[in-house]
Image: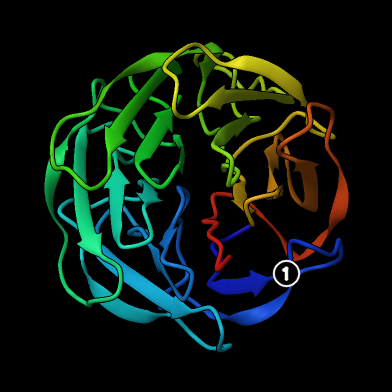
Amino acid sequence: MGNHNQITYFAHATPGNATDFGDILTASEMGGNGCSNGTRGVTPPNNVNTNELQYITFGSLGNAIDFGNHTENGYNASGVSNGTRGVFCGNNAAIDAMGYITIASLGNATDFGNLTVGRGDLCTFESETRGVIAGGDASGRSDVIDYIIIASLGNASDFGDMTARNGHPKGCSSAAGRGLIGGGKDVDGGDGYTDEIQYVTISSNGNATDFGDLTRAHGYFACSGNGSIAVWCCGYDAPANYDTMDYVTIATLGNASDFGDDAHNRRTLCGMSGT
């Protein structure tokens, strides 16, 4: 299966296949979510031995460029953004650290605060004010949902719980403030996956509620959205990687539909959006 360095892109508004954008700096595992200000997207570190952040400019095809360094080494950190500041949370070592950057300015990340529970392989999404961090892996799968105020440094606070413990889910949010959590591993210590999509209202603390189902049970994928549509890309369910993409309309409950195919069968990849 190997590691990939390819970046692909698609338009959320029109279902179809993904197209080559460029390459990240080195082929390796990444996972997590990137963060964006609509013009520039920044990816988390992509290897257990690196803290390198990379960025792309959405309007121009091309390879990723060095941005600076995160506060921690490791992959599967996930990012949230308010359009100005990006915050990367956790990583594969199940740490509770969060580091922040100013997306428009190259440079190293600075300490933001701590999660309520150290974990990685988690789902993140945001409103203009709040960042939400859901699920992930610690000593086992987690059902914890945390939130932060992105513009203010400090530790995360409890938001509520997911419908079940879940590692490697991914999701995104709508312009109206609904956040989705989709798929992932749902069995501690095993290879069971879920097709469940859950949702929360970002402005109101509380437990997640069932939204619908993905087209298959899997995890280790990427998710991105345009404020109206959420698209899950690629992923894994033993023993196969996938190139498929699913989508839903975030404002209406229901099951996912086929969006198209990525250019590669792959897993543990990073998603972000320029819209």
Q: Is residue 103 left or right of residue 101?
A: right
Quarter where residue 138 is shown:
top left
The N terminus, quarter of image: bottom right
Residue 22 or residue 47, whichever sits in front: 22
The C terminus, quarter of image: bottom right
Q: Which residue sits at x=38%, y=49%?
A: 79
> Which residue matches tag 1?
10
Residue 204 or residue 91, whichever sits in front: 204
Q: Position of residue 224 (x, y in %)?
A: 61, 53
| Vertical arrangement, residue 160 with respect to residue 244, above or below | above
SS assignment at label 1: loop
| Vertical arrangement, residue 35 with respect to residue 185, above or below | below
Q: Disc 1 residue type?
A: Phe
Q: Which residue sits at x=74%, y=68%?
A: 11
Q: Which residue sits at x=73%, y=22%?
A: 211
Q: Position of residue 14 (x, y in %)?
A: 84, 65
Q: Is residue 234 visible?
A: yes
Quarter where residue 114 is shown:
top left
Q: Residues within 10 Å of mark 1 (few under 14, many from 20)?
A: some
